[in-house]
Amino acid sequence: MSSRPELQAPPEIFYDDTEARKYTSSSRIAEIQTKLSERALELLALPDDGVPRLLLDIGCGSGLSGETITENGHQWIGLDISQSMLNVALEKEVEGDLLLGDMGQGLGLRPGVIDGAISISAVQWLCNADKSSHEPRLRLKAFFGSLYRCLARGARAVLQVYPENLAQRELILSYAMRAGFAGGVVVDFPHSTKSRKEYGLHFRQAQTEEKAENKQERQGQRMGVEEEGTDEKER
């Protein structure tokens, strides 16, 4: 059997009460999670002005990443599909607001309210069809579309992932771009099989950039209409 959790069972089943407590009590996992979260916050590049930001932790689990966010002086909302993981977070009395939900069905947050988002080892789960009703492409579309909308203009999302292969990496990136994100992938320790870490770095465009892009699209559409009209006259 594969050692990758996402290939063994859906997350809400894999992370049951036993696995949630085992995961949270592991000092090794806690250390890794802290390092990944600190790196994700670094890549968010939030203003160093002492003002707390509201961040979203996608796949927050038992709150390990949220604790790092709190230590860095920010507020956070955590979303996870595993009730068992969230129960552990509640027992720990983490400082974030916790939501039970499936990111593949959209995040359900109001537009423009989030100053930045991180996710540690979660988004690759969307590439698996755990149920007959699951279509990875539709789930990625719903996720990235809702993520783009809930971010403030100019905000970033940093999504640390473990893609199974190149096709999975490209699939995730393509749906981020379709949602409107700019950005790419940051790879730490690219030549190390053991230490290699990938972070999707996604930018929600500032208002001026979006206006310019929308203007270009409208101009292109008008040109297309004019050209079609010319062709009709010539016929």
Image (cartoon, rainbow, N blue to C red):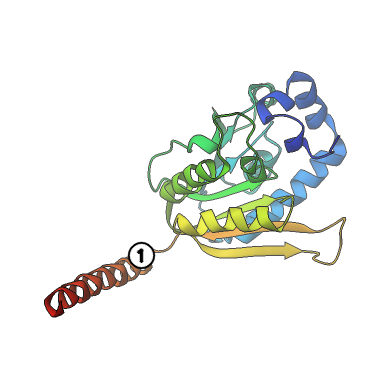
- Which image quadrant: the N terminus? top right
Q: Quadrant of the C terminus?
A: bottom left
- In the figure, 120 relative to 47: above or below? above
Q: Is residue 126 left or right of residue 166?
A: left
Is residue 198 depicted above or below 70 in this figure?
below
Can you tell which quarter of the image residue 125 is in? top right
Q: Is residue 46 visible?
A: no
Question: Can the viewer see residue 13?
Answer: yes
Between 57 and 232, the residue placed more toward the observer is 232
In x, y percent, where is residue 69? 63, 45
Residue 229: x %, y % from top left: 15, 73
Q: Examine the image and state in which quarter residue 6 appears.
A: top right
Residue 190: % across, % down: 79, 66
| Left or right of 123 on screen, residue 190 | right
Name the residue carrying label 1. 210
Residue at left offset 72%, top offset 63%: 187
Q: Amino acid at mark 1?
A: Glu
Marks counted in the figure total: 1
Image quadrant in which you'd find residue 201: bottom right
Q: Which residue appears at 21% of the width and 76% of the height? A: 227
Residue 62 lies left or right of residue 190; in this view the side is left
Residue nearest the viewer, comparing 83 with 106 = 106
Single out the residue that lies furthest toward the bottom.
Answer: 234
Question: Depth check: 23 or 94 in front?
Answer: 23
| Residue at the image position 45 percent from the left and 48 percent from the top | 145
